[in-house]
Image: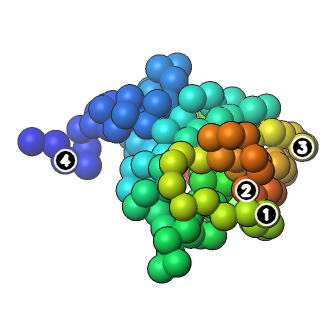
Amino acid sequence: MMDNFTPNQFVDELRQAGVPEEFHEWLSAGGVGALVVKMGIRFSELGAERSVATMPVEGNTQVAGILHGGAHAVLAETLGSFAASVHAGPGRHAVGIELSATHHRSIAAGTVTGTCTAIHLGGTLATHEIVITDEQGRRLSTARITNMIRDNRH
């Protein structure tokens, strides 16, 4: 039986989400988060300068049958927040303070890819741009997130 105090309880979750092995110890206490799992987000790269993840359209649609705008935002915020957290490093954490998104085109099936690129990596703020594309490489949305970098409380 697993409980909230079992070390490395999220190892399977991290593997299923495609989180590189080098980040497993760092994320072993909390995993990737329930929403990331629910949305089917899967990382292929994770770094402060650049992070990439995919997400299925199926299961993340709105009533019109297209990918929900909020799903775009979830993918963007996930990528930007993880990238900012990597930048923050040990003893610090990232807290999102702004997210904006522009939707360019819709998608009704398949998989989308979010590519997160650092715009600014400072001591107190990190800003990233996230471009979400379809399987043909067409831009679906563009998002920007700014995270505040804070010291962990002891």
Q: Is residue 28 left or right of residue 57?
A: left
- Residues under labels 3 and 4: Cα distance? 39 Å
Callout 1–callout 2 Cβ contact below 8 Å: yes
Is residue 98 shown to the viewer in this render? Answer: no
Mark 3 / mark 4, whichever is N-terminal: 4
Badge 2 density bin: few <14, some 14–19, many ≥20, Cα 10 Å: many
How crowded pointer 1 is (Cα within 10 Å; few <14, some 14-19, many 20+) is rated as few
Under circle 1, the secondary element is loop
Tell me which numbered mark, 4 or 1, is placed earlier along the sequence. Answer: 4
Q: Residue at coordinates 73% horizontally, 40% vertically from top-left?
A: 137
- Rounded to the nearest angstrom, the CA distance separating label 2 from label 4 is 40 Å
Q: Do the residues under discs 2 and 4 have CB atoms within 8 angstroms?
A: no
Q: Amino acid at mark 2?
A: Leu
Front residue of 72/98: it is: 72
Which residue is at 19% across, 47% downward?
Answer: 3
> Residue 119, which numbered label?
3
Q: Earlier in the sequence, mark 1 or mark 2?
A: 1
In 3D space, how far apart are the residues under numbered discs 3 and 2 (Cα atoms)? 20 Å
Q: Earlier in the sequence, mark 2 or mark 4?
A: 4
> In the image as oriented, which residue stretches furthest toward the top?
22
Q: Which residue is mark 2?
A: 140
Where is 58 relative to 41, above or below?
below
Badge 3 crowding class, 10 Å Cα cut-off, few under 14, some 14 to 19, many 20 or more, is some
Q: CA distance from mark 3 to mark 1?
A: 21 Å
Q: Residue 149: x percent and y percent?
A: 75, 50
The percent position of residue 84, horizontal first and vertical second, equals 72, 43
Q: Is mark 4 in CB contact (under 8 Å) with mark 1?
A: no
Determine which of the numbered discs, if any, sits on residue 104 in the image.
Answer: 1
What residue is disc 4 on?
3
Label 3 vs label 4, nearer the camera: 3
